[in-house]
Image (cartoon, helix red, strand yellow):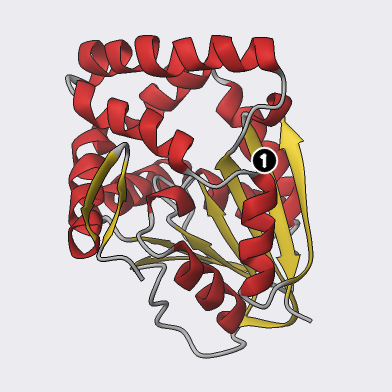
Amino acid sequence: MSDTTDFGYREVPRGEKASLVREVFSSVAPSYDLMNDMMSLGIHRIWKRIFVNAIAASPRETLLDLAGGTGDIAFGALERGAKRVILTDVNPAMLEVAQKRALDRGITQGLEFAVVDAEHIPLPDRSVEKVSIAFGLRNCTDKDAVLREARRVLRPGGRFHCLEFSKVGIEPLARIYDTWSFKVLPEIGARVAKDRESYEYLAESIRRFPDQETLEDMMRDAGLERVAHRNLSGGIVAIHSGWRL
């Protein structure tokens, strides 16, 4: 394993990436939801709704939501009928926003919060029915470790779901998307969040993330089976899933 890893387009020591990512999300946490709406023109809400429907956590199931940020997936899963959701994130600032949002929504039952590094999940083997991660895997230093941990905590018959930016498969759309990502988004970040560098990193991290087929191979290597993906918006994002059988 290399001593360095990607942080956007930079190579940094592996041991430093987690703290750099925490700095980014601590900076953007107060404006995170507003920026998501502006960056995606509101489409992220549709992606997340489709993702929650794909997870389909039932009243008999516990969902472990990794890198859960400000809570969109956790709240959606509870509204759809999940019995219990464990909302986790490595960044306390993001979880503080999620907790405030949960209180504002009157969510007091079935939701737990925990600061968790997705590479080292503090749960027993075979303890949950569903694991999700939305727009978080690309920020992890050891993505293979996250996938292995997700499989470890799943019960047999449980399913892992990942929503992540991916490779656009339509060339004209790819050119427009590149312009939006590298020209427009950092400018919005500078004006709205007063943080150009964090949004430059976010755009770069998307381009460094494995494409659809590569991520499928990584999931299989982690022991997940019946792996599949579904492109949304021409491949701007993709939903990946795999089972522990």
Closer to us: 154 or 98 = 154
Who's the residue at 28% across and 11% down the image? 187
Residue 147, image x and y in percent?
A: 55, 69
- Determine whether 211 is above or below 68 in the image: above
- Residue 56: horizontal and vertical position, in percent? 76, 56
Mark 1: few, some, or many residues within 10 Å (few <14, many ≥20)? many
Would you say residue 59 is visible in this rendering? no
Q: Does residue 152 appear left or right of residue 244 in this picture?
A: left
Specify the farthest residue to the right: 226
At horizontal 35% and vertical 52% (from top left) the residue drawn is: 99
Q: Quadrant of residue 203?
A: top left
245, above or below 83, in the image: below
The x, y position of residue 111, in whole percent, is 49, 63
| Quadrant of the rendered image containing residue 198 | top left
* 223 sits left or right of 9 in the view: right
> Quick one: which residue is furthest to the front in this view?
2
Q: Quadrant of the N terminus?
A: bottom left
* SS under mark 1: strand
Name which residue lies at 25% across and 47% down: 11
- In this view of the protein, which residue sits in the foreground, 35 or 172? 172
Picture coordinates of residue 200 (x, y %)? 29, 26
**Residue at 40% of width from left, 71% of height from top?**
119
Residue beneath label 1, please?
238
Residue 226 position (above or below residue 78): below
Task: Give above or below for 215 relative to 46.
Answer: below
Viewer-closest of 65 and 9: 9
**How many marks can you see?**
1
Which of the image's four quarters has the C terminus? bottom right
Viewer can see residue 225: yes
- What type is the residue that disc 1 sits on? Ala
Question: Along the horizontal axis of the image, is 93 left or right of 131?
Answer: left
